[in-house]
Image (spheres, rainbow, N blue to C red):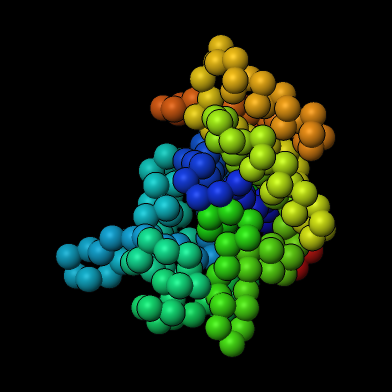
């Protein structure tokens, strides 16, 4: 059985996919058999034959260099760049939690380290019709701890503190933070990171600059964040 970690963010477009790719690359380069998984993926383009390309999965695969097939990475892929619950209501194919769990079990049975990425922020609805599924339901059902990704820029103190407060109120464990789009020497960004740590008590594990191809974190420290699922 694999060791696992869930990557969530303070919102959409904070760079979860890019950072996740760097995380998995670090694991792969340290000699680990690493894999990627995501419950639902929106905003994808179509191939000439009409099938959807799981864009986030492809991006992670390219950044990390893993050989894992795209077909294993995400059970629900949508074209519209909406929250999965809305994309599914338009396109069909509502998320079934059992299918997400089954896909995760299969990946966990084949790889040593599985990094699961969320959709949008922690409150993203995955399904909202007769059945209501949020990211936290997926996290809880799989028994995962979370790594929080945030943008280093303006507004991140509010976003990090509110996200952390919500997750703690819902008993979702957080192992630490990584800040994306960081500019060394930027007084505001450095203060943002300091304040987020002060106000949440969370450790900043790494800072990622635009264009980085490596995660500035020791592989053994990264591996220590992963736990066997209680699923």
Relative to 157, say whether 79 is above or below. Answer: below
Query: At 72% from the left edge and 41% from the top edge, which residue is drawn?
Result: 161
Among the 4 quarters of the image, the one containing residue 216: top right
How many numbered discs sit on the rendered protein?
A: 0
Residue 87, image x, y percentages: 41, 71
Query: At 55% from the left edge and 15% from the top edge, which residue is drawn?
Result: 186
Q: Is residue 214 visible?
A: no
Relative to 63, say whether 121 is above or below. Answer: below
In terms of depth relative to the viewer, which is nearer, 57 or 66?
A: 57
20 to the left or right of 105: left
Query: At 53% from the left edge and 58% from the top edge, which residue is drawn?
Result: 119
87 to the left or right of 165: left
Residue sticking out furthest to the top: 185
Q: Quadrant of the N terminus?
A: bottom right
Q: Quadrant of the C terminus?
A: bottom right
In terms of depth relative to the viewer, which is nearer, 199 or 91?
A: 199
Among the 4 quarters of the image, the one containing residue 143: bottom right
Residue 133, image x, y percentages: 62, 74
Q: Is residue 51 visible?
A: yes
Residue 175, image x, y percentages: 75, 43
145 to the left or right of 105: right
Query: At 55% from the left edge and 70% from the top edge, which residue is drawn?
Result: 126
Residue sticking out furthest to the bottom: 130
Residue 217, image x, y percentages: 63, 27
Residue sticking out furthest to the left: 48
């Amino acid at each position: 059985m694999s060791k696992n970690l869930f990557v969530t963010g303070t919102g959409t477009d904070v760079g979860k996919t890019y950072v996740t790719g760097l995380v998995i690359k670090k694991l792969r380069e340290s000699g680990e058999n690493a894999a990627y998984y995501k419950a639902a993926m929106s905003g994808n383009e179509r191939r000439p034959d009409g099938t959807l390309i799981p864009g986030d999965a492809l991006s992670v695969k390219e950044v990390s260099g893993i050989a894992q097939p795209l077909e294993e990475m995400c059970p629900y892929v949508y074209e519209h760049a909406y929250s999965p619950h809305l994309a599914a209501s338009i396109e069909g194919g509502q998320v079934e939690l059992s299918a997400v769990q089954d896909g995760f079990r299969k990946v966990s049975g084949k790889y040593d380290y599985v990094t699961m990425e969320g959709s949008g922020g922690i409150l993203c609805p995955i399904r909202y019709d007769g059945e209501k599924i949020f990211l936290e339901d997926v996290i809880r059902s799989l028994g995962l701890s979370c790594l929080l990704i945030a943008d280093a820029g303006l507004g991140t103190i509010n976003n990090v503190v509110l996200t952390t407060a919500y997750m703690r109120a819902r008993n979702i464990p957080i192992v630490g933070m990584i800040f994306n789009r960081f500019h060394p020497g930027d007084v505001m960004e450095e203060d943002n990171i300091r304040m987020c740590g002060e106000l949440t008590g969370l450790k900043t594990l790494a800072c990622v600059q635009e264009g980085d191809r490596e995660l500035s974190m020791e592989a053994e420290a990264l591996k220590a964040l992963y736990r066997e699922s209680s699923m």
